[in-house]
Image: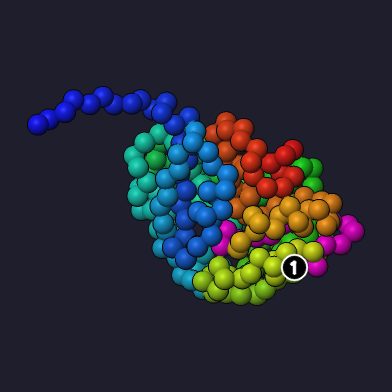
Amino acid sequence: MSFEYSLDDESYYKHRLGLIVLESDETIEQEFRYILDGTTSIYHSRIPCDKVVTKDNLKKMEEQLPVSTNLLPNISFDVIGYACTSGATFIGSEMISNIIKSQRNCNHVTDPIKAVKAALNKLNCKNIGFVSPYERGVTEGMRSHLEDEGFKIKNILAYEESDDTVVARISEKDTLNAACKVYTRECDAIFISCTNLKTFKIIKEVEQKLKIPVISSNLALTWHMMTLSGNTNKSGPGMLFSS
């Protein structure tokens, strides 16, 4: 026996987000769940990547991005995010935006490095302590990018770990200690890079100790995607969401 049904309209969710996640990432989706509420839908796709994080391997993801974007539902998005900080640095935010917009209807495209810069500018922070999980070449490339964008890197602490699957296992306690150790009196913010590095449970504690904002890749990306979509949810950790 058939049963009649009706369809809802696109207003069922007030905000629609898409997220393209590295196949090796075990963290960003979990941290997003701390913040999103029932007004927001999020759709995930995965992008193939080499677990060894080098500049050349990161750039290869540009070739995979159209296919991964097309694995998202064919709907209208408020924002689509490409969730790789180092990848976005070396591919370029403009190139990422052009590729994604060529494949899906979306109002905005962002990525972690673009979001981090937006967050630091919102908080008027220019002097940065930089915590990096990456090997030296990737870390230095990101440092150069941030300095070219007008930020001053006052100190760097790097794990120098090239295996992204290992980065996912780094303890939050060690990241907390690294964020505190990288601090100098010249710093007006701490940036903790990489979407695979767990940070949400330690951000408030580090901020309470240092009395300055702490911006992680996942924190900045969730904040930027929500801001661009018009979502004013303030439930994220730290000074960025409370500002």
Q: Residue at x 35, y 49 (%)?
A: 71
Towards the viewer: 239 or 126:
239
Residue 163 in picture, x, y percent from top left: 54, 74
The residue where tag 1 is placed is: 178
Towards the viewer: 22 or 33:
33
Q: Magenta stretch: residue 219 in it?
A: no
> Which image quarter holds the C terminus?
top right
Per the picture, the main secondary structure of the magenta-coloured stretch is: loop
Query: Vertically, is 15 above or below 94?
Result: above
Q: Residue at x 73, y 64 (%)?
A: 176
Amino acid beneath label 1: Ala
> Which image quarter holds the N terminus?
top left
Residue numbers of the magenta segment: 181-196
Residue 67 in picture, x, y percent from top left: 36, 53
Residue 19 in picture, x, y percent from top left: 47, 48
- Mark 1 secondary-structure assignment: helix
Res 192 seen here = yes
Q: Give the tally of numbered discs.
A: 1
Residue extending farthest left: 1
